[in-house]
Image: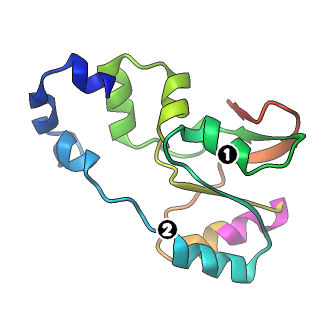
Amino acid sequence: RKVFDINSKEVLDEMLPTGKTLGETLLTPTKIYVKPILELISKINVKAISHITGGGFNENIPRSLPDGFTAKITKHSYEVPYIFKHLQEVGGISEHDMYNTFNMGIGMTVVVDKDDADEAVSILRSAGVESFCIGTIIKGDEGIVIE
């Protein structure tokens, strides 16, 4: 919201390299993950699920983990969509605040055994969900570490 308080409303009409305006991009509907997640759960032991909404990675992922465990996210394990890079630049927003506020292109996370990770990605991709292995679960009390 700060981005739009600082800049004029014309910023919403700005054409992005994606071929859509900023306004059109921001109005993209939320993906519904119910069917792909149910399919995944029917085939693999899913240990945790987190819908990445307001509060970004930092607030949502740790809530899905038991005490004593930390999500270690590798930020370069996937391509952050252009819209987030653009908002960060235009708004002068720190990387920490970006991951604390936005989903950075990851709408949902699931935790599975390491041995099931590739199969989980394959199942979700087959269901039409762009999927990546973005990190690991480690022992610790930080909740989340983004490297």
- Amino acid type indicated by mark 2: Val
Q: Secondary structure at mark 1?
A: helix
Q: Quadrant of residue 14?
A: top left
- The residue indicated by pointer 1 is 61
Q: Position of residue 121 (x, y in %)?
A: 63, 66
Magenta-drawn stretch contains 118:
yes
Q: Quadrant of the C terminus?
A: top right
| The N terminus sits in image quarter | top left
Q: Predominant secondary structure in magenta?
A: helix
Residue at horizontal 62 percent and vertical 44 percent from the top? 60
Judged from the image, the secondary structure of the residue bearing numbered disc 2 is: loop
- Residue appearing at x 29%, y 24% in the figure: 3
Q: Which residues are magenta?
A: 114-120
When asked about the image quadrant of residue 38, the answer is bottom right
> In the rendered image, which residue does mark 2 sit on?
129
| 3D distance between C-alphas at marks 1 and 2 | 19 Å
- Three-letter amino acid code of the residue under disc 1: Ile
- Residue 63 on image: x %, y %: 71, 46
Q: Nearer the viewer, residue 122 or 108?
A: 108
Mark 1 or mark 2, which has the lower sequence index? 1
Label 2 crowding class (10 Å Cα cut-off): few <14, some 14-19, many 20+? some
Please state if 117 lies on the left or on the right of 50 as rendered: right
Q: On screen, 59 above or below 42?
A: above
Say whether residue 70 is left or right of residue 12: right
